[in-house]
Each structure stands twice: as C-alpha cells, then as structure tokens.
Amino acid sequence: MRLYVKITSGFILLDLIENNPIKLNMSVADIMEPTANPSTYSQTFRVPNTANNNLFFKSAFNINAQSFDATKKIESYIEDSNVTIAVGSIRLSNIITNNRDRNVEYEVTFFGEVSDFSAAIGGSFMNSLNLTAYNHVKSYVNVVDSWSKNLFLGDIIYPLIEWGYDYLDGRPVQNTLALNHGTLAPNGFTANNHPLSIDQFKPVIRAKVLFDAIFASSGFTYESDFITGSDFTSQYIITEQTDTAIDRKTPKFQAKSSGAYTLNQTLVKILLPFEIYDTANSFNNSTSVFTVPLTFQNPLVDYFTFNIAGGYRQFATTTPVTFSIQVFNLTTNTIIATQSFTYTPPVQYYLYTFNHTFNIYNAQAAINEELIFRVSAPSIILGLASIENVTLTQSTTIDNINVLNNYLPNNVKNIDFLKAIIERFNLVLEPSKTISKHFIITPWVDWVEQGAQRDWTDLVDGNVDIQSKPLFESQTRSNTFLDDEDSDYVNYNFQLATKRTFGQLDIDSQNENIVGNKVTQSLFAPTPLLPIGNASAQTSASANQKLAAKFLIPHIAKDTTTERTPMVPKLRLVYYNGMVAAPLEWHIKNDANTTIHWNEYPLVSQYSIFNTTTFNDLAWRNTAPLWAITGAVTNPPMRTTSDLFNNYWLKWYNFTYDPYGRILEMNIILDYSNIFDLRFNDKIFIKDSWFMVNKITDYQVGKKTSCKVELVRVGESISIIP
C-alpha cells in the first residue's frame, strides 16, 4: 500500500501507519441516481509525523501550530501491489497531538477525480469562459457564411429567429418576421421594400464548444464517441444576456423628431426628443446632444443614418432645392461632417414631398466630445421648405461580436450547464485508469451494455448474511421529466392552456408498493416552432397567408396586448437544420445596403432533421407540434418515437422498475487483482445470476479484504451473452 502526493518536482511517497490502513469506498454510476456520478473516496485515515511527512504537510497546507489551510487539496494517487488503483487528491482535515508522548499525526481524506473535477469548475458563470477565439466581425458575409457552416467550421450559426421589436407610436421600428399584408403587417420581411437588417440576427453557439470550454477551464480532458458524434455536434445553444430586438453589441442609438421645421434658408438644430434605444447612454434626448462613446477612427466604421421626410413649395421658379445636414462638434466648435441632397421641382407653384435616407460616413470625433445635428435649405430663393420628420441612427458597418461578454448568461454556472447536459443524455463520467484527469463519457444506455464478464462465485464471504430487496423500492411510483418554463409567448400560452411545459413526460409505473413522484427538470427551456406573423391556414385566408402558415421559425419574444417585445430567454438546446425551403420569398439587406432575396432560410428546432419521417427529438416526449393547432395541416407532422426519453432513459427506467430486479448486499473477499481493472458496468456472475457492482465499501488497500458490496441483479433489459 503506497500513497503518493504531488510536489513541485513530481510525486513523493508518504510514510503510512501500518495498523491504520486506507479504506476506500468506490462507485461510478449509481443505478438509482444514474447522473450523480460519484467517485472513489476514503474514510479518514492518519499518517505519522515523520521527517518526510512533516516537511510535506507544513509546506503543502501552510501549517502554523494547529492552524492550516483547510481548503487546500493536493494531487495524489494510491498504489496497491505496485498497481495504481485510485487517482485524486488528499485533504488535511485534522492534526492530532498527544501531549503525553508528544506524538503528532495528520488526519487526511482521499477523494477521487470526480470530486476534484467539480471543485475545479467551481462557482464560475458561463460568461467567464474563454471564448475569445470566436470573436468576429458581424457582417452580411459572415452571417450568410454561417448558414453553410463556413464561419468557424459551423461553431457559430446565425439562424432566423423572431427576437421581438422596438416600438414607436405603437408600431414596430424594425421590419417584422411576418407576411407583408396591408395594415395587418405593413413592414413584413416578405416584401421587397421591408428587408431584415443584419442586426436582427443573433448567433447561436455549438453546445460542444461550451462543453469543451468548461473542460478546458477545469484542467481535465475527456474522450467520448457521443460528445464528438454527429448528433451532439449538430446541437446548438440559444442564449442572450439582454432583452434587445436587434443585436446592438457596439454602442448605438436611435432617436426621432416631432413636429415640423420651417427652414426658408435658415439653419435649424434638429430636436430628437423620442429616444428609441441608446445602448451606451450616449444621447441626451432632452438637449439632443450626442456624446461620443468611442473615437471615430474610421469613417467607414461609425456613421450616422438620417431618414428625412418633408416637403417644399416654390413660386415662379423651378430652381433646384438643396437640403443640407450638418454634424456640428460643440466641443471644438467646428462642422465635422456634412451631407446634401437636391430636388428639382417639376413645375412652378408646386408642393413637392419627399422621403430621403442617406448616411454620413465622415463624422470623426474624439471620445466624450459633444455633437449636435443641424439642417438647412440654403438654395431656396422664393417660397419655403419644411422637414416633417427626422429619424437619426448611429450605426456601424463593422460590429465586433464578443460571444464571451455579450451572449453567454451571467447567471448560469458552468457546473450547472455541464450537469444539464449530463442529465439530459443520461451520461456516465468514468475516470480513466491510465490517464490522469481524464474521463470516458458515455450515455448510460450504451455504457450499461459494455464491460467485461467476471465470476465472483468463489469470492463470496459465506460468514456474512446476504440481504436482498426489490430494486424498485429505491424509486418513486411516478416520474416527471420536463424542461424549464419560459415567458416567450409560445411557451407561455402553452403553459397557460395545459398547465404543462411543451414536451413534458409524466410516467406512472403502476406499482402500488411505492409512492411519490420524482421531478427531473432541465436547465433548458423548450423551443417549439410556430409560423411567421399574419399567417393563417383557414379556408378564408389568402393564398399567401396559407403559405405563411408553413413558414415555421422559433419565436423568442413576449406578447403584450399590442406589442411583441424582446426578452432574455432561458437557455435553449436545439439542432441546426441547415437551409430549408422558404414557402415565401423573404429579404435581407447586405453590407452595401442592397436588398437580397432568399428562398431558403436557416432553421434551428428541436428536431434533428426537419420535414422528414426519421429524426431525433430533443423533447422528453415527442409532442404534437403547435402549428397543427392553427389548422396548418399541410405542415409536416413531425411525430417520432425517437425522443429524449426513449433514446436515453427508457432502458434505465425498465431496468430500475423491473419487478424481478434486486439489490443485494453481501460481503465479497477482494484484493487488488479484483479492483484495479474493475469497471462498474462489468457483469459479475455469482452462482446462477448476473449482477453489476453498484458500490464497494471499506476496501482495505494492501490486503485481501471482506468488503461490503452492493450488487444489482441484471434483468432482461440488459443483453448478456456468456
């Protein structure tokens, strides 16, 4: 029996007390709590105060008299007969001093690597992960490249999702993800003149990227056919920190005027009292002064967009009329940018109205300098002109997307995200016996079918009674598997109508000998699809409304009586379905402000493949899609038995609730040869039955020991070919 501990230069051997052996308790996957993933740990044991030990403990745990750093842990491993049987860390829990003979002993506990892994992740939040490698320029090219997985090899996708809208005077400021149709949806994105902006797309992140980043932060590694497999690598996380309609990750603002400005060759300050948004708190709408939040280094990066509506009347002349916009720096008392546009009246005595949008790119100013905006019509000779409406937007053509700081939640811990993935797919984290700080990760449904076969019939300690009880007694009568509730209008309305979450599974074992209900609730919220706005499958609907009823997207926004507003969603786990056919043509503006037409759209959903008959569903129980309720019966039915519970939990459920399943407690005489290569999915033959080891208690390192072993009888749900 040997205990090795890590020091700066490597590992050293500690001296042990011969009559105070190390006793280990071991388990990997508890049958009753399959996602608990316990580990090897020891009972408290003592080591002597030898010169070798004293030097180590005083330096490692900062011992000062009887005080020491109780939070410190030191990497270590245990050998039995020159074979490593446990890897983890030791922690000092007590110093025992015998005043009579002045003897000192150190009381320590050994913990396996699973415990170290959880401690290494600690209480950090997801927005602390190092994902700076994924910072990128938000551009039309990158957004479109992501749809074909050409942005970071598909780690970042910009899918089509309705995030809600900003409102002014009761109308959405942004163009909407709706069928363009008269007064019902006058600015829907199916109209050529109402394209979406790049700002209305937000990134989703491959789940494996976050999984890997958490492992990297812990110093541990893993191997897993599941995590690296095609199904899990097709899954993405929808996340957002703020309730914004558009992606305003760099400082921006938008404001609007009210009333009319009569110009008549005068220079007028533009008053913009209605602030629509201001992400950097840079615009004072009471004074209409803009304080520069960052230096305008590049005129192609930061610019102002003006939308101006108005009219003019000229008498006895057709002289062209020129309107000018100035950006005036109050701090330096200089005009820093100007832009003009000209109209020529077609006839004399004519009232001409206009609506003009243009950009001012060359406004450069230093941080904290104050700017105002002015308008004039100096070329008017006779008559007068007026500006009826001005909307001003500070924009940028280069939007640097920082996934780390701007999207990942600051209220979800890394360990909770990891546990959510482990629980959802019923994963077993099995510490490697050959590689330090390394796990083998396997879904329980596959793990339980693996393992070697061993005959322990002759190792049973016949001097100790054997206890047997039904396996199902460790469970509740019923189980509920469900996702978290969320407040988007799709989930909210479903929860309100059904008192359930979408995809919820309630299952009753019908076993009258047990009671209670166990709830397994996910960190993730459901993401059911619904058609775009203004869709209808009713007989009286127009042809385009019926087509819109088949235009299915996620909706992550809240509804009030009159508005569809942004929200901060719970985390969502979805598949990326690639580019799917759009029932109606839709439109988006590129970086050159040109409208681009699309007949496909990037879809994320709970389904691994959309509009097919063979697919996986990330819901606990595949549920009739909500679009069927709207009467859009021509949409794909998307029904399957390949849902989360059937794929990853059904075998465990049948195994655990098997009426013939038994938990046996017996003593078995074990030594290092039985322990060092034991896996807890090994099938153990004893007399006339097959078992799996659930727990080993009080294995005494270095000796052949009669250990208490908890075994679970393998029923017919697990295949064994002797």
Image (cartoon, rainbow, N blue to C red):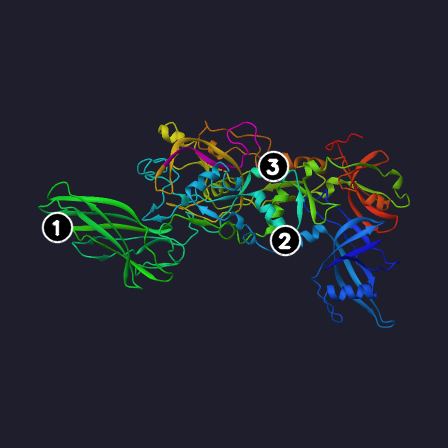
Q: CA distance from mark 2 to mark 1?
A: 73 Å
What stretch of residues is rendered in magenta? 596-615
Tell me the residue that label 1 is attached to: 383
Q: Which residue: 19% across, 52% down? A: 377
338, above or below 232, in the image = below
Tell me the residue that label 2 is attached to: 121
Q: Is residue 653 visible?
A: no
Residue 607: in magenta span: yes
Asked whether, in this view, residue 668 is left or right of residue 720, the answer is right
Q: CA distance from mark 2 to mark 3?
A: 27 Å
Q: Are marks 2 and 1 in contact (CB under 8 Å)?
A: no
Q: Position of residue 189 (x, y in %)?
A: 37, 38
Q: Position of residue 194 (x, y in %)?
A: 34, 39
Mark 2 is on which residue type?
Ile
Q: Position of residue 346 (x, y in %)?
A: 14, 40
Where disc 2 sits, the SS reads: helix
Q: Nearer the viewer, mark 3 or mark 1?
A: 1
